[in-house]
Structures are given as structure tokens and as C-alpha cells.
Amino acid sequence: MADLLLVEDDQRIGQVLQSALAANGHDVAWQRTGASALQAATDRNFDLVLLDLGLPDIDGIDLCRSLKAQQPEGVLVILTARREEMDVVVGLEAGADDYLTKPFGLTELLARVRAHVRRGSARGSRVESYECGDLLVEPSARRCRIKGTEVALRAKEFDLLERLAADAGQAVSRETLMADVWDDNWFGSTKTLDVHIAALRRKLTDRANAHDPPARIPRITTLRGHGYRLEAEPT
């Protein structure tokens, strides 16, 4: 089904995860150090990376940044025993698209992987484009441009923008965004949604303000107690 990179130094956990993922049809490359993971990502493109943050040779957050820089279109899921919310936020800001805190169930892990792989497979059939003011979103090419200049978005940031653009001018609930962009059976905190929205806003605004005069782009409005809305008209 998908090419996966598993980065886990614990022998027992690594064997269990590799066996479970392989049994579900995935081709799994298991690496136990950050250095070998970076080499594997240099030699081969992966659909999804499962990254344990507690590695013996490289800080997990630094490795997360490096892996996303090497394979920006791949999905990266953090596996962590760090339960503090700030640790999770730092991981997401470093480029992770999703996270699971240990201990987690195999059923939950496999459901997350299936959801990410399914969404990745669906991308090839998208042909629509969305244009508002100086913002152009092209789902089929997974490209976002402002006044012709491409905006570098992480996978989940683009997915959020595309989902909001599909219902531009309409309110989209937090539950709908989590189900459509992450997983129908999401188990974690919805804080990940707020982190990605904040990053998306910042990148769009920075790119718009880089032009003179500033480009006109639609605003992402927070609807407290409900969700978000991408305005149908630029500001």
C-alpha cells in the first residue's frame, strides 16, 4: 500500500510495529538511529515516516526538521513519550503532520496510517483550482501561489487551505476539519488544528506582505466555539 520509514531505536517496539505494518501491506524500512534514517531518506522517497523522538544519536526535533526538508511532500508522524503539550506543539512546528503519544494501540496507529495513505492516493485525481484576489490554490499540483510566487506549505497546511477553499465563504467546523484533514477517528487533542492554522496564516501573510503593494488574499477567520472560515473575498 505505501512505502514507510520507521525510525525507532527500541528493539521490541520496532519489531512489533514493523510486523504490524507489513501485515497490513506496507513496505517498511526500519531504522534505529537518526543518521541511518537520514541516509534512508536520501536514498529513497517515502510516503510516510513514523519517527520516535527519543533517539540515541540525534535530537528528534532536529531530525524531524531534516527529514521534512529532504521529503517535504511525505507525511511525518511523531511517536513520542513526551506528554507535555508544548513538546507536541514544538514537534508540529518542526514539520510533523501528526503525532501519537506512547503507549498507543496498534489499532489506532494503523488507522492513522491508513487515513494518511488514503488522502495521499486521492491527490492525483484533483483538478480544480481556487482563485481569490492574488491567491491561487491548485489542488491537482498541490501548489499555492500569491501573485505568481509559490508559497512553501507543509502537507497538512496545504490540505487545510484546500479544504477551507472548497467551501470558501462558509463556516467549517473543527470536527469537519479534523475528520477531513486528519482522521475520521482522531484520538488526540485538536490543538494540532490551531497550530497548523496559525502557521498557514503566518506563511500566507508573510508572502503577501513581501509584495509592494501587499498582495490581496482572503482572510482565515476564527469562529469561536465552531471552527474557521476562509473568506470568499480578499482583504
Image (spheres, rainbow, N blue to C red):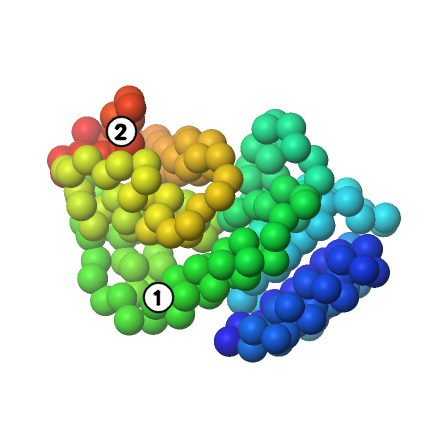
The CA span between labels 2 and 1 is: 27 Å
Q: Residue at x 61, y 39 (%)?
A: 91
Residue placed most toward the observer, 202 or 176? 176
Residue placed most toward the observer, 32 or 113? 113
Q: Residue at x 63, y 74 (%)?
A: 22
Residue type at mark 2 is: His
**Location of mark 1 (residue):** 123
Secondary element at image label 1: helix
With 158 as the anchor, is 59 left or right in this view? right
**Location of mark 2 (residue):** 226
Residue placed most toward the observer, 52 or 35? 52
Image spot of residue 145 (x, y percent): 32, 50
Crowding at dot 2, Cα within 10 Å, few <14 / some 14-19 / many 20+, comes out as: few
On screen, residue 65 above or below 32:
above
Note whether residue 139 is visible: yes
Question: Can you tell which quarter of the image residue 221 is in?
Answer: top left
Image spot of residue 45 (x, y percent): 59, 70
Q: Residue furthest top?
A: 224
Secondary element at image label 2: loop
Count the marks: how many? 2
Residue placed most toward the observer, 136 or 223? 223
On screen, residue 93 above or below 162:
above
Residue type at mark 1 is: Arg
